[in-house]
Image: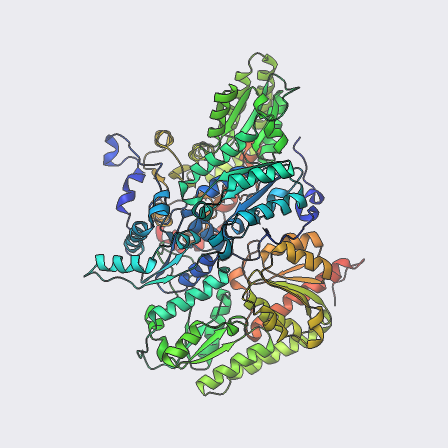
Amino acid sequence: MPPTITKEACLLDRIRVTPSAEATQNACKLCAPLGAALVFKGIQGAVPLLHGSQGCSTYIRRYLISHYKEPIDIACSNFSEHSAIFGGGANLKLALENVRHQYAPSLVGIATTCLSETIGDDVAMFIKEYRRSKTGQTLPPIVHVSTPSYQGSHMEGFHRAVWATVSALAGDERRGDARRVNLFPGMLSPADIRHLKQMTAAFGLEAVVLPDYSETLDGGLWKDYQRVPEGGTPVDAIAAAGAAEASIELGGSLAMARETAASFLQQRFAVRPFRLGMPIGIRQTDVLIQSLAEISGRPVPGCYAEQRGRLLDTLVDGHKYVNTVRAALYGEEDLVAGMAGFLAEIGIHPVVCASGGRSMHLAEAIRAQIPASWHAETAILEDADFTAIETAVDTARPDLIIGHSKGYAMSRRLGIPLVRIGFPIHDRMGGSRLLHVGYEGAMALFDRLANTLIERRQDASPIGYTYM
Amino acid sequence: MTPIPILKQREKQIYEKGEAKDGRPFDMACDRHSLAGSVSQRACVFCGSRVVLYPIADALHLIHGPIGCAAYTWDIRGALSSGPQLHRMSFSTDLREQQVIFGGETRLYQALCDLIDAYRPAAAFVYSTCIVGIIGDDVEAVCRRVSREKGIDVLPVHSEGFRGTKKDGYRAACDALFKLVGTGDTAGIQPSSINILGEFNIAGEAWAIRDYYERMGVQVLSVMTGDSRVSEIRRAHGAALNVVQCSGAMTFLAERMTAEYGIPFIRASYFGIEDMAKALYDVAAYFRFDPTLQQRTETLVRDAVNGIMPELLRIKADLAGKRAAIYVGGAFKAFSLIKALRLLGMRVVLAGSQTGNSDDYQTLRDMCDPDTVILDDANPLELSKYVIEKGADLFIGGVKERPIAFKLGIGFCDHNHERKISLAGFEGMLHLAREIHTTVTSPVWRFAPFRSKQE
């Protein structure tokens, strides 16, 4: 008879993990072209094109599809052995031609892979040659971003693609008379992006959000197949970025980075930069709200006072379930830094804060958010894999683990519940609908954290109860 | 909405049966490198190697390259193990700029030593990714050195992504496996013994297949590579017969075992009642020196079919006349699915694969209904175009095809390596039927705009 699989027999409960300095074991990061492709998916009419092997685009598509549960078309220049030896110019030009023919894109975003970077393909020159060969034809803008995956994680790819798009397209031409802000949200969920757009609109501002995949990666059913899903940042709006009132850039570690889209627009077009942390929790949302008030010159709309009031009421109602609780937190640096701030506000001590990224700003960003008395007992891991994270979590024995789906094996092994946030959410529905930002995002997060802890108590109770 | 254009260079990889051109000889183009800029559903050489070797549960699988290739294949297959679970870890040398410039051999050596000391695997596979082929690391030399020092087989797998297609990856995996075959003791093997090749134990499927053969009285020496152990692969050359599933993945190994050890092979598919029964009868026929084997097979098949038939017929009543689209990796799977869907009263309106060869497509054309569209190495635009034109009620494919179906409001069944439900064998046919029934009969499709347009 076929063997019966017992839960106890599985790796998830059994394997002993041993960190190694030279081998990454269960990475807590992805590669740079994934981040870049995601950014291009958030531009209206854009098609991402990876310059490298077929596998890169297929794997990245598959990974993104599992989270967003939407069609995600990413083209590839599809290297052969010949292109690896003699250069990928011919393939890239053919790919551009075919993408134009099939998708009629309003922008093509080319991200390089480790392969094309290593053989030293001059992509800028290939694009120039391609344009020259098409003289007389109207071509869409072609943005190129260098994303070798041996330099940084998917977050570097993401931020670099935002920067590359803005620096390639932005001018100072006026467009309409709305008061515009450039909003660079970082790698948030479609629900977060929708919420941020509502917030800026409530202040009478028109936000040019880059990237804006709130519709392209979270839309309704289709009557016909859409070659490029509707939605996304309009290309001409990015072109007008230099004439905006201000730029708002979100992300604790990004705020410390030297060269970003916001810093570029400041230097080139004197657009005022507001480089803030992720607006997760009360204080960081307050900062965003104040910035919007300052930019717009308008008072804070009443709805935010109401939302903030409801949030505070919720926090008070549930404070006993969360205060003094200890948590482990992992994921993208900006999200981890933002989340650590919110946890500190409600009395949850993030005893382990980990990321696979290595911007070298994570520790600084987190320490700025949590009480000084916690510093000594907060393990901050950069460039970490899940083996290192699990070792740290096993030592700290927190009450909760907070992070994306890939921590499930660790959570199950250690018997500590996992609250899923961020990206990727591969084993649950609704990753696109998770709200992290704003007062409403904080409320949603609080409910999930508190309910997980309540459920734990309830399950542990010998009699169970139906009334708190 | 403007109609979706087909790329000129791809026209010969698309065939619509029953068109005017049907009078001409059928010459479907296939076995080609994917077209640049066409959003192919295919993966790469590395993917091919990884999927074949992945289920070897007591081996260390180390991916030499930057992080992406390892991250995207972490615990990706539903290949179950009855014992060790080492295959479910994702190990990578995670190369950084430093190693890309100065070479990654030192890091590879150290990573291998660390991991072998920590996990004590039965053997180690080292997968070379694109960049390793470019920077020229001598992976063979590092593997030889570690092998010598640690006393286990450390096998390089030449799987640089750009070296060809997924099929070339299968070949690289088979080359690595072949180095293990023939290194073990073959004492105590009975005359009617087989290896099952190309069965990866997704959702425990290999256990069901193995169980059938054992109940027939056949000894299953190894399954490659579902739930397999290095020690089983070492003695696989002692088997009397290789039974190869999956059109491309492991034929290379079977051929080499024929050449080197004189072991013949037959093909099989374990999907659908018809093909499953044939897979068992073919083996029984091969071992006809034992007549009891044939009898036991007949009893087994009869009991199994009788067991599932009543429910299949109930399901068929709801599905009769519905139209299905199939887009899978290997063409053999498509053949079996067409037969299985027919059994449920359904019609296949689109059939395609990522890696079919010209013989496969000839077979596909012969078995398909008139008007069926046949696609080689398709992309989302082509798939959606024909799914709409043909009015499919069901799509069978993998993760990358799922959102295409769902966006248009069409039922969908996963039939790739990530499935969590066993679809092979007689029980598997029932699971497939239930899956199809659950998706096709859902009331949610009534709200799909695509559906209302048709009615």
Q: Which residue corresponds to the image point at 60% horizontal and 74% vertical from the top-left? A: A281
Q: Position of residue B210 (x, y in %)?
A: 60, 28
Above or below residue B141? Residue B426 is above
Q: Nearer the viewer, residue A211 or B103?
A: B103
Q: Quadrant of residue A429?
A: bottom right
Q: Position of residue A448 (x, y in %)?
A: 64, 65
Left-right relation of A274 to B215: left
Colouring used for the render:
rainbow
Q: Which residue corresponds to the image point at 57% horizontal and 16% vertical from the top-left? A: B294
Q: Position of residue B365 (x, y in %)?
A: 34, 32
Quadrant (top left, top right, bottom left, bottom right) of the C terminus of chain A: bottom right
Q: Residue furthest right?
A: A462
Q: Nearer the viewer, residue A292 or A59?
A: A59
Q: Position of residue A180 (x, y in %)?
A: 39, 79
Q: Can residue A396 be seen in the rendering of this structure?
A: yes
Left-right relation of B312 to A369: left
